[in-house]
């Protein structure tokens, strides 16, 4: 009886590790994190833009607007990941074993 309990405990532990790995390698975390990091960098570049840079862009602070929009997109990805966490994939059901071939029974039709 204790062997069955230990086996069940090991199975539950592996299922927990699988779910953790699925959440850890979620693409939304990587994309959102990169967008947030680059958004911060580009936003800082937008705050430090010179008058010559603004004149080149027809007085539109492109770095500031691009950085802020990258921050928004990155935060949306992270929010999406937080609201809809990734679930571990369900294991494929095992096929039912086929009965061993035996002698033909009367009344069975030959194929």
Image (cartoon, rainbow, N blue to C red):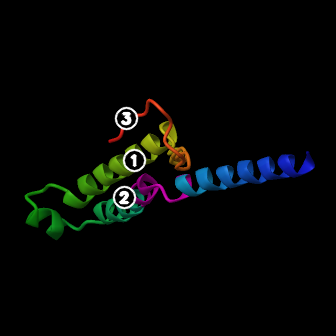
Confirm whether the magenta stretch covers residue 62: no
State the residue lying farthest toward the right: 2
Instruction: Categorize mark 2 by other alpha carbons within 10 Å: few (<14), some (14-19), many (20+).
Output: many
Q: Which of 94 and 17 is in front in this view?
A: 94
**Residue placed at 23% from the left, 68% from the top?**
50
Q: Quadrant of the N terminus?
A: top right
Q: Quadrant of the C terminus?
A: top left
Instruction: Categorize mark 3 by other alpha carbons within 10 Å: few (<14), some (14-19), many (20+).
Output: few
Question: In the picture shown, does residue 45 fall above or below 6?
Answer: below
**Residue placed at 10% from the left, 62% from the top?**
57
Labelled pair 2, 1 in contact (Cβ < 8 Å): yes
Disc 2 is placed on an element classified as helix
Numbered label attached to residue 77: 1
Confirm whether the magenta stretch covers residue 28: yes
Image coordinates for residue 72, horizontal then vertical, percent: 35, 46
**Alpha carbon of mark 2 to alpha carbon of mark 1: how far?**
9 Å
* Nearer mark to the viewer, of 3 and 1: 3
Residue 92 horizontal side relative to residue 66, left or right: right
**Alpha carbon of mark 3 to alpha carbon of mark 1: how far?**
60 Å
The range drawn in magenta is: 23-33
Labelled pair 2, 3 in contact (Cβ < 8 Å): no
Report which residue position mark 3 lands on: 109
Of mark 2 and mark 1, the one earlier in the sequence is 2
Total marks shown come to 3
Q: Which of 41 and 94 is in front in this view?
A: 94
Instruction: Categorize mark 1 by other alpha carbons within 10 Å: few (<14), some (14-19), many (20+).
Output: many
Magenta stretch, overall SS: helix
Report which residue position mark 2 lands on: 35
């Amino acid at each position: 009886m204790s062997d069955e309990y230990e086996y069940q405990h090991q199975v539950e532990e592996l299922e927990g590790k699988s779910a953790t790995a699925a959440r850890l390698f979620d693409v939304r975390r990587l994309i959102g994190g990169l967008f947030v990091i680059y958004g911060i960098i580009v936003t800082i570049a937008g705050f430090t833009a010179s008058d010559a840079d603004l004149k080149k862009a027809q007085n539109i602070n492109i770095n500031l607007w691009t950085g802020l929009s990258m921050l928004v997109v990155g935060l949306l990805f992270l929010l999406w990941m937080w609201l809809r966490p990734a679930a571990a994939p369900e294991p494929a059901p095992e096929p039912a074993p086929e009965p061993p071939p035996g002698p033909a029974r009367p009344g069975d039709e030959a194929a």
